[in-house]
Image: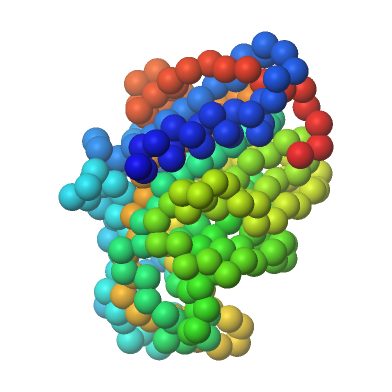
Amino acid sequence: MRTQIAAMMVVFAAVLVFGTSGPVRAVTLVEDFSGGIPSGWVIESLDANGAPWTLTAPDEMGWLQIAKAADDDPLTAYQAIGAGITSQFMLVGDFSIWMNFNLVDFPASNGNGWNEALLNVNNAAGRFEVLRARGTASNFVEGYSTQSLGAVADSTTEGLLGITRQGQTLSAWIDDGSGPVLVGSDTSPALAGPMRVFVEAAQQEYDPYTRPSTALDVRFNDISITADTITPEPSTLALLGAGAVGVLAYGWRRRRCAR
């Protein structure tokens, strides 16, 4: 079922981002974690004392696992902590990203913030993300840029998170297997430049209150990225040739317009 959903979403993403206006070449990159964390991605982590994040790839299912034990760390109680992988390549032009997630252990917050599983794109000018979150009494999915772009009650424990960009507009999506649902969009020149991709599990504080300090276990797999251009940095020029699961296909790109 999950494979079928992923396949449908790749087709859906291609229609969303590239449309049918003409045959212009685009690039698609698909990552899984059956061989570990692919070249071109690096680990970022901010730990609680005594309960560091662990990243395992592949886990027993061949996925990326991001997990931590419960902690009692007063030094980080009032700050967000998290861990994940960030791309060393940049997405240029219009793009779509879809990613499977599975919330294996995703408890209610024991602070005033949220446990989160999120997909993020960012550059020096701004960031945009879609996140599945759980607070003390609520489960929801949210689009976020400089502020919340919309939050929808959602108890999905496995499915797809997605971000698409057309022109200067970024949109956040979730799919629980019933089809993609738009969560929120933001339009800004700051969001139009080249962007990295960041996949993360986090425990977010709600200022000035404490963050969750529960255990957390989130899994990710099958990241599918379709973009006008995927640009490696000088240190990762081998990415598209040998490092990742690979550049799998060329497709059709639609004309540029507001997303």
Q: Is residue 120 visible?
A: no
Question: Seen in the image, is 235 located left or right of residue 185?
Answer: left
Q: Quadrant of the N terminus?
A: top left
Task: Work out which residue is located at the far left of the displayed protein and give it.
Answer: 60
Percent of width and height locating residue 109? 44, 81
Instruction: Give above or below for 231 relative to 150.
Output: above
Res 97 quadrant in image: top right
Instruction: Give above or below for 125 relative to 255.
Output: below
Instruction: Give above or below for 14 relative to 65.
Output: above
- Please give the name of the residue rendered at 30% of the width and 55% of the height, measured from the top-left corner: 65
Image color mode: rainbow
Res 74 quadrant in image: bottom left
Q: Is residue 251 visible?
A: yes
- Please give the name of the residue rendered at 43% of the width and 20% of the height, measured from the top-left corner: 248
- Please give the name of the residue rendered at 61% of the width and 52% of the height, measured from the top-left corner: 181
- Please give the name of the residue rendered at 43% of the width and 38% of the height, measured from the top-left corner: 6
Considering depth in this image, is 46 or 19 the residue closer to the camera?
A: 19
